[in-house]
Amino acid sequence: MSKKSNVWQYFYKTSGTVATCLLCNRNYSRRGRGTTCLRNHLKSKHPPEFLALSGDIKFLDLVKREISIGSPHHPTAQLELNLHETDPDPLDTDEISYNPRSDEKLALMLLNHSFEFIEESTFVNFVRVLQPRFLIQPRSYYENILCEDIHRKMQEHLKKQLNLLDAVSLSTSLYQDQNGEGLLSLSCSGISGDFQSVRLMLKCEALNSESTSKVACYIRDLIPSSTIEIPKEKTHCIIRDEITALPGSLPDCSVHRLHMCVRIALQSNELLQNLSSKCKQIVDHFASSKMANDHLKFIQEIRLTRDPCRLKPFDPFQWNSTFHMMASVFRMKDAVSLYCEEYNLVQIYPDEWIEIDLCNKVMQPCEETIKIWSNPLTTTSSVIPLVAALRDSLRTDVHNYVSSVTICSFARKLLEELEIKFSHVLSDMKFLMATYLDPRYKQAFFTEREEHLVANEILILLGRAQEDLNGQPPLKIIKVSSTSSLKNESKIDSILDSILTTGSTNTQHATTSFGSQSQIKNLLYLYNSEPRIDRNMDPLMWWKTNIKYNSLYSIVRKFLSAPASSVASQRLFRESTHLYFDMRAGLSSENASKMLLIKSNFSFSNSEFKE
């Protein structure tokens, strides 16, 4: 290495690949045998010497002189600060750990991108400009980091998280697209000691078209083959979706039960099916012809002077696709009617337009309910209240739409299926207890029989720990305000609020018989007499704040841990299409499954994954 470079006046060449800074006595590696790394060190750690090295020492003196004679608010005052602010030194780290840490961060970035991303010239050129010394490795290198090192760390992290939970609820979910690709998942929900909701993905199975025939085996072995063992005494319940449910049984997932109700109601209504078939013919016509689409746009913009809308295509993998397709046709009914009349396309008559509109109104509460249940933070405590609200909505629809035989029949069948598919919720203790322990609802949806069932269950659960309740110091009573922000204006919300308002009087009267018989019953009486909090408030925060009920904490964490639905696979599958592209290019399904597990849990990971 030639010492002609003037940077060597500040460094001593220890060996062929190591140089020592004469100003701070730090050693730096020169694997490329260049001096760029040494200049970067001077720039970040010794700015005056770097400027002198660059021949700018006169400029530095001039700046300092201007600052010393100028106003404290002079523009060059900020310049002096910038000159003395040290940029992060890319060499200011241990040589051994620098590259591995960078490689790990790049590997984690590939959870959201295809492996082809690191081979693109634009990315490679960007990295070369950012850090010329950084070497981008082959895709197999980063695949190994993810599927070995990071996956092992994630497994250890999940085990630690599970050990912190007193009770967990498992949920299984399967989603497949028309190509046979899909995702089978096992997730876990629980409540931490500080009343934070915890959701973890315990296992993922990335399915390709070749593994379709093995799906039944995968479902059967999903829980037993999990590498993370969960004690049976910790498992509160298992929520299965429609495809992973036990043979011959209904799904435990509330979302899929409601899907079934809608599907059966639609299939049993021949007139509504004919109407949806007409809408599909119209949508398919415009989807297959750009000329037709352009003319429809012309009708909307020029003849009707409206902003152009687009028709929504039918998707057989979406439970509400039929209704969204019909709604999109209805929004454009004037333009569609003009076009159909002009080109002699299938006609939708005035009374049929009315039926499409009424059908969407009947379906609105169902869609709102499924949206609420699909939220990962929604628990089983919302199932009984929302089923009651749906029941009231459909009964009203049957009465109000009696003039339309088609819609009245559809609403009646939907109500009938709802009663059948959700008849178990008022006898299943996991739903009753969850609803009661949610301070937003309590006993508002219970009859006297159900109130007694819940009270007896709590007495049994807490009776074993009676001695723990004795001798506790009196705790300060903390009230939580029931005021909240503006409510979401939706049909299901207004129905639910109406039920809660109407039932507020009966609730406290029906539970007075439990008071003053024992300490546990007194505690329940105190809880029953508390005003229900607003539905927009967080029930877990209410429990965390009201520590006077700490005797109930164990059962609260248990029964409020169960989610209302099991729909994790569909969401994760759609966010991970790049991984399935890599699977088609040669990535093994086993490694793809490991990457999906890391990706799904990354938001819950601790600092070791975020540093």
Image (cartoon, helix red, strand yellow):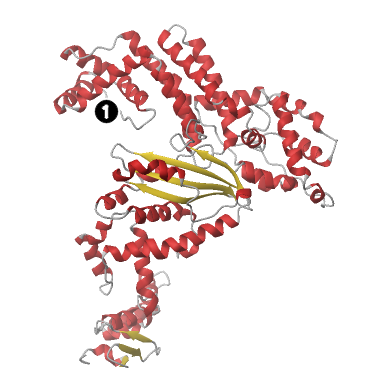
Point 36% across, 54% down: residue: 590
Residue that protrudes farthest toward the top in the picture: 403
Q: Secondary structure at mark 1?
A: loop
Query: In the drawing, does residue 480 fall left or right of residue 606?
Result: right
Q: Position of residue 589 (x, y in %)?
A: 33, 52
Q: Position of residue 327 (x, y in %)?
A: 35, 22
Q: Position of residue 383 (x, y in %)?
A: 56, 31
Task: Decide: few, some or many residues near mark 1? Use Cα within 10 Å; few <14, some 14-19, many ≥20.
Answer: some
Q: Position of residue 566 (x, y in %)?
A: 48, 39
Q: Please indicate, yes or no, whether residue 602 appears anywhere in the rendered image.
A: yes
Label 1: which residue? 310
Q: Please indicate, yes or no, whether residue 167 appears anywhere in the rendered image.
A: no
Above or below — where is 55 with respect to 452?
A: below
Point 27% across, 21% down: residue: 280
Q: Amino acid at mark 1?
A: Arg
Above or below — where is 396 with respect to 293?
A: above
Q: Quadrant of residue 144?
A: bottom left
Above or below — where is 182 with respect to 116?
A: above
